[in-house]
Every structure is written in structure tokens, then in C-alpha cells.
Amino acid sequence: MRSRSGLGAVLLGGLVTLAGAAAAAAAVTVVAVAAPGVAEGPGFYWTSSAVAVTLHGALGLAGGRIAARRLDGGRGGGAVRFHLLVCAGPVLATVVTQSGALGDGRAAVALAAVCAACGGALTGGWSIARRSRLAS
């Protein structure tokens, strides 16, 4: 595994996660502008927190799968390095997008989103590595 492909995998995994989070933020902004009364209630807070955690899990899965493909399914490198590279992009992107939740004192929501992204990325990386091993 070359360091260039490792850096590319981290960047691709992070970009997928950032793009999905940006799309979700745009959708939430449209809802908040269209119906400001809805966005002020406690139900909106809990619903948006649950959606954020679920979304980051799904984005982590997508980012992990793309990063794992870039790393050729883990062939030619160690398993620990492979999984660290697969997780790095989605987890770093999630930390960046959840910095607002940390600033608002919602550390539990931010931590849950980061854990979901890590779990999704590990699952995506594992599935590609498994398929790669079965094919060879």
C-alpha cells in the first residue's frame, strides 16, 4: 500500500461524509426557514439529533466503502493500518461537522455521531475487504 493511496482514501472518505452532511444541513435550513415554529421545539432537537447520528452512520458506511476500494480491499498492507485509514476520513469529517454540537454543550450527540461514523466506516471497510478476500 502506497502512502499516496492511503492519503487518497482518507480524503475520499472524508469528502463523501462532508458532502452528505452539507446536503443534510441544507435540508434542515430549508425546514427551519419554511417553518420557524417547528424548528424551535424540543421535538425538533431530539429528532434532528437522532437523524444526525443515523446520517453519520450511513455516511461513514459509504465513506468507508469508497476508502476501502481505494485501498484495494486491504491487500498489501496490515489489517490495523487498513481499518485506521478507512475510518480516518469519515471520523474526521464528522468531528468537523459536529463541532457546533460541542459548542452548544451537546457532547453526547457529537460523540454518538462520531461513534456512528466510525462504526459505519468499519462496517463498509470490512465488507469490501471480505469481498476482496473472497474474490482472490
Image (cartoon, rainbow, N blue to C red):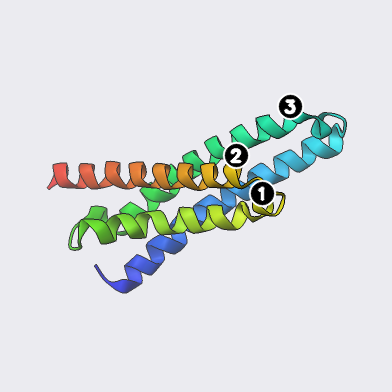
Question: What's under tag 1, amino acid-wise?
Answer: Ala
Question: What's under tag 3, amino acid-wise?
Answer: Gly
User: Sequence-wise, which precedes: disc 1 or disc 3?
Assistant: 3
- Name of the residue lying farthest toward the top: 43
Give the foreground label among 2 and 1.
1
At label 1, counting other C-alpha atoms closer than 10 Å, the crowd grade (few under 14, some 14-19, many 20 or more) is: some
Question: What's under tag 2, amino acid-wise?
Answer: Ala
**Which of 66 and 108 lies nearest the eye of the viewer?**
108
Give the quadrant of residue 28: top right
Give the quadrant of residue 27: top right
User: Sequence-wise, which precedes: disc 2 or disc 3?
Assistant: 3
User: Sequence-wise, which precedes: disc 2 or disc 1?
Assistant: 2
> Are discs 2 and 1 less than 8 Å apart at CB?
yes
Give the spatial CA distance, label 2 vs label 3: 14 Å
Identify the residue under disc 1.
101
Identify the residue under disc 3.
43
Give the spatial CA distance, label 1 vs label 3: 16 Å
Give the quadrant of residue 120: top left
Q: Quadrant of the N terminus?
A: bottom left
Residue at coordinates 73% horizontally, 26% vertically from top-left? 43
Q: Is residue 112 left or right of residue 84?
A: right
> Are discs 2 and 3 less than 8 Å apart at CB?
no
Q: Is residue 20 left or right of residue 118?
A: right
Identify the residue under disc 2.
52
Q: Position of residue 4 (x, y in %)?
A: 34, 72
Q: Is residue 12 left or right of residue 36?
A: left
Q: Position of residue 92 (x, y in %)?
A: 50, 58
Asked which secondary structure carries label 3, the reply is helix
